[in-house]
Amino acid sequence: MKLARGILATMVASMLAVVSLSPAASAQAGPRSWDCERERWPNDGDAGGVSGAATLQWNNTAAKAWVAFDAYSEKFTLVNKTKADTRGRLWLKNAWGAWVVFDMIWVDADESSERHDLSLDEGEAVQIELRLNGRGTCSISTLCA
């Protein structure tokens, strides 16, 4: 029994040494994830308006999706360059200060996009949200029409 434990311990130690020295194991980066990035553009040509975007990107690769609100042209855009279906929502604050969905865009996976023309009151508070099916959500709520 002692001999069997000794052989087993030697085998496990040998396997661990091989795994830790293999180039594939040492080349792996940290945890992989969808990163959320938010941007605001207060100087977009619309006096008092604030444009912005919310982006989900897979580890700084070309796989990403984003929603954008342009205050000057009052356009809401969703672009999807991922393998997942994507939803974008644009929210406005109602008279009681609660956020309500004003517009929604759904696009399929793989290089699809859609843009909606909106008609909003000047100074209206705007929030945009991106939901990438099964991968996460990213939003920004400090925008203004």
Image (spheres, rainbow, N blue to C red):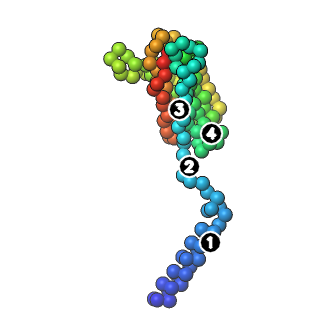
Amino acid type at image mark 3: Arg
Q: Examine the rendered structure and indicate whether residue 125 appears above or below residue 9.
A: above
Q: Nearer the viewer, residue 12 or 21?
A: 21
Q: Nearer the viewer, residue 37 or 116?
A: 37
Q: Which is more N-terminal, label 3 or label 4?
A: 3
The residue that mark 2 highlights is: 32
In this view, the mark in front (3 or 1): 3
The residue that mark 4 highlights is: 63
Q: Which is more N-terminal, label 2 or label 4?
A: 2
Residue at the image position 45 percent from the left and 15 percent from the top: 124
Q: Nearer the viewer, residue 51 or 96?
A: 51
The residue that mark 3 highlights is: 38
Q: Position of residue 33 (x, y in %)?
A: 54, 46
Amino acid type at image mark 4: Ala
Classify 10 Å Cα crowding around label 3: few (below 14), some (14-19), many (20 and above).
some
Amino acid type at image mark 1: Val
Q: How far apart, in angstroms, are the residues tagged by discs 3 and 2? A: 19 Å
Instruction: Assign a secondary structure to mark 3.
Output: strand
Q: How far apart, in angstroms, are the residues tagged by discs 4 and 2? A: 13 Å
Q: Which is more N-terminal, label 1 or label 3?
A: 1
Amino acid type at image mark 2: Arg
Instruction: Assign a secondary structure to mark 4.
Output: loop
Residue 103 appears in the figure: no
CB under 8 Å between discs 4 and 2: no
In this view, the mark in front (3 or 2): 3
Quadrant placement of the N terminus = bottom left
Instruction: Assign a secondary structure to mark 2.
Output: loop
The residue that mark 1 highlights is: 18
